[in-house]
Image (cartoon, grey):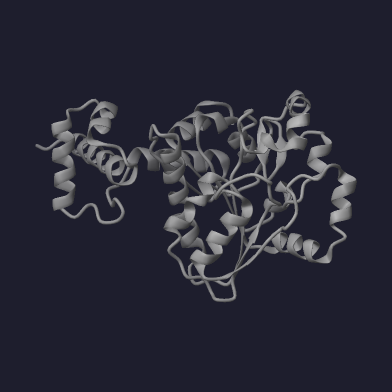
Amino acid sequence: MDDPTEDLTEQLERARVAWFYFMGGLTQQEIAARMNMTRLRVNKIIGQVREDGAVRIDVTLPLTDCIALAEAVTARYGLAEAVVVPDVPDYLEQKRVIGEAAGAMAGALVEGRDLGIGVATGRTLSFAVRRLHAKPHPDSWVVGLTGGVTRSSGTNTFEVATSFARGLGVECHYLTAPLYCASPESRETLLLIDELTDVLARTEIADLGITSCGSLAEDATLTQIRVVKDHLDDVLKRGAVGEFLGCFLDAQGRPVDHFLNESIIALSPDKLKLKPMSMLVSGGIEKVQIIRAILRGGYVNRLVTNEAVARALMAGPR
């Protein structure tokens, strides 16, 4: 009599090999080392899934352990949906696979609908447009959720929002202001510009918010902004574990008491919380604290991340 457990184990093995090879970009030797099997077996599995049609552009075999993790995270943090992708060793490749999974999720949410789509910034989000195969209603629009930074390449809010708008074939609106002002007073002065306040209002009425988050490592893009760099030590002393939409949050998901949090040109996390659809797209073990803080704060109702982060979210305190 066939053992169904053994059959499921073989299916999962095939699914992971196929995913790592066709989606994750790993070589056969890297997969063999990662999964503790011979390269010959990896080659055989890849040949089998090609022959039986299990792989087209997407891998159709279920990654059951990732699905189980996603369901567990969804239940624990009260989310509407979560997607967990396998870990891959390359830093940029990990961002790519998370971003592409987010693009697929976003596409399903916007297909055929008339809605506003708010998009934040970041390398991971820049990959999402590759899988954003959807056609929303022509009256839909995209808006950048944050002001810009003065140094970036392909990941600035203006560039990410533009790529989303082009991919969806809709118009785009920009918060043409710095992410951080020098003080709360200078922020209020900027907001005297009607066009800027109109776009900021548009970030609030967007139906879907697609966001990322950042650690406070010294080499992060955000911490290179002069006003942040000058006050980073103080922000850390006040308990910040990361940033979300430019807002510095503590471990419980509360904005820390610092003037930088009053000087941001961006949609606030509290207003993101009011949206019917909101996504956090982020991975990497160095971001576990800020991802957990965002989920604790209830700011988003959907998550796309990688296995290591999902396991850490389940292992630590809610």
Where residue 101 sits: x, y (%)? 43, 50
Foreground of the two, 8 or 129: 129
Where is 159 relative to 5, above or below?
below
Residue drawn at x 53%, y 49% is 125
Q: Is residue 22 visible?
A: yes
Q: What residue do we see at 75% from left, 54% from top?
A: 177
Q: Is residue 58 above or below residue 305?
A: below
Give the position of the N terminus as an image quadrant.
top left
Whether residue 120 appears in this view of the structure is: no
Across and down, in percent, residue 256 comes to 77, 34
Q: Quadrant of residue 232?
A: top right
Q: Residue furthest left?
A: 1
Residue that appears at 81% across and 45% down: 181
Residue at the bottom extreme of this rendering: 138
Judge whether 204 appears above or below 216 on screen: below
The answer to which image quadrant residue 214 occupies is top right
**Residue 88 at x, y = what percent?**
38, 35
State which quadrant residue 217 falls in: top right
Quadrant occupied by the C terminus = top right
Q: Position of residue 61 (x, y in %)?
A: 27, 48
**Residue nearest the viewer, comparing 228 with 63:** 228
Left or right, 309 with respect to 118, comes to: left
**On the picture, is 255 further left or further right than 71?**
right
